[in-house]
Image: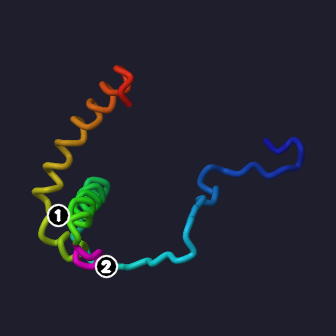
Amino acid sequence: DDREGKKQEKPSEKKPVVVVKSTKVKVTEVKCPQQNNGYDCGVYLLAHAKAIAESYPKGMKLESCFEHLSKHVDAKSATAMRKQIPKWIKEVESSARSGDG
């Protein structure tokens, strides 16, 4: 509605908000396993995040974590992740209902 002469912003026109608490941000572009279909990108993202989170605390250097991805993220791990997601959602729902979350 443009009654007041103000242009209404469409949702797709909104700018993303990025909050960075450090002035030293390192962005590293790496090659990593990708899905071979048009619908598993989110599952692969979660599988990558899980693989990094599981290996990084073990003292592995971050660069090695990325190498670790090619060994632990593939179609088989994506299928396992896809099956795990509904279980996680049910756990969160259950926790929220019981007041534990």
What's drawn in magenta, residue-wise? 60-64
Determine the secondary structure under disc 2: loop
Residue 30, numbered circle = 2
Residue 32 locus on image (x, y percent): 25, 73
Question: How crowded is the residue under tag 2: few (<14 C-alpha within 10 Å), some, or many (20+)?
Answer: few
Q: Main secondary structure of the magenta part?
A: helix
Mark 2 and mark 1: span between their CA atoms? 14 Å
Which residue shows up at 38% across the image and 31% down it? 101
- Lateral position of residue 50 relative to residue 93, left or right: left
Residue 73, numbered circle = 1
Q: Is residue 63 magenta?
A: yes
In the displayed structure, 17 sits above or below 23; it is: above
Which residue shows up at 24% across the image and 42% down it? 85
Asked whether 37 or 78 is in front, the reply is 78
In the displayed structure, 34 sits above or below 80; it is: below
Residue 73 locus on image (x, y percent): 17, 64
Residue 71 locus on image (x, y percent): 12, 70
Which residue shows up at 37% across the image and 26% down it? 96
Please tell me in which quadrant of the rendered image residue 61 appears. bottom left
Asked whether the viewer can see residue 39, the reply is no
Residue 62 locus on image (x, y percent): 29, 75
Please tell me in which quadrant of the rendered image residue 77 appears. bottom left
Asked whether 18 or 60 is in front, the reply is 60
- Lateral position of residue 24 relative to residue 87, left or right: right
Q: How is the image coloured?
A: rainbow
